[in-house]
Image (cartoon, rainbow, N blue to C red):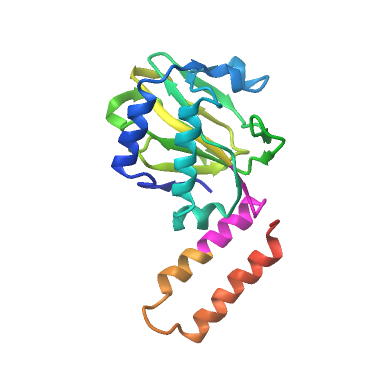
Amino acid sequence: MLLQLPDVLSAEQVAACRAELDKAEWADGRVTAGHQARHVKCNAQLPQRHPTALRLGEMIVTTLERSPAFLSAALPLKVFPPMFNRYGEGEHFGTHVDTAIRQVPGTPHRVRTDLSATLFLSEPDDYHGGELVVEDNFGAHAVKLRAGSMVLYPASSLHHVETVTNGARVAAVFWIQSMIRDNGQRALLYDLDTAIQQLTPDGPPDPALVRLTGVYHNLLRQWADA
């Protein structure tokens, strides 16, 4: 399931992020790439333990914890701290699959990467190229969202970032270990939850809706790792 979540961050939050990131000292993005990915990765990245990265990453995770759309779609158990990258002119990230298990820097904690997330921090008109292209059974999907919006997709997907030909693309990327490991089960629960929310009236719910809600929670109870 590839899902776009608009306006995860407010305009004020995006502006605050960019004010700090635009004056930060960026490092070679290949530092955090796996053995294969480092051969196709060409971008800049804020060091993971940089105070700005930690502060902005905490703000993003705290905001996501209050996002019903994110919680419904991801059913998160663990969130890997956001990393911040920048693609300038001529930079790109070739086709790859994300590392299955990531260790949180400076801790013994590991996160299984069920879902990948890209949170755009540049407006689409600020750069040319730079589309995130995700491949699935139905083909390749190019994604380029307005600043503050996010895309979620299975971390098992082949994906790449097109070459930026002008301007700069700034984004936060991170991974989620979901309570629901299986992508198909997670998509089914998201569709069911979305339908329940759309059917829920302002007044007392219909008994049939109560039973449908029970089906959702019983499936979650049966499938969840939590």
* Rendered position, 219 above or below 31: below
* Rendered position, 176 above or below 158: below
Q: Quadrant of residue 112?
A: top right
State the residue at coordinates (69%, 57%): 226
- Is 111 in front, or is 218? 111
Any magenta on residue 162?
no
Q: Using the rendered image of the protein, determine whether residue 190 is visible from the camera's viewpoint.
A: yes
Residue stretch rendered in magenta on the structure = 176-191
* Rendered position, 36 above or below 98: above
Taking the image as shown, residue 186 lies to the left or right of residue 144, namely right
State the residue at coordinates (56%, 25%): 95
Q: Residue furthest front?
A: 51
Q: Position of residue 138 (x, y in %)?
A: 53, 43
State the residue at coordinates (63%, 38%): 156
Question: For the image shown, how many numbered marks are present on the structure?
Answer: 0
Q: Position of residue 117 (x, y in %)?
A: 51, 40
Q: Quadrant of residue 184?
A: bottom right
Any magenta on residue 187?
yes
Q: Position of residue 54 (x, y in %)?
A: 51, 33
Q: Position of residue 102 (x, y in %)?
A: 66, 34
- Is 133 in front, or is 5? 5
Q: Using the rendered image of the protein, determine whether residue 162 is visible from the camera's viewpoint.
A: no
State the residue at coordinates (44%, 69%): 197
Taking the image as shown, residue 226 lies to the left or right of residue 56, namely right
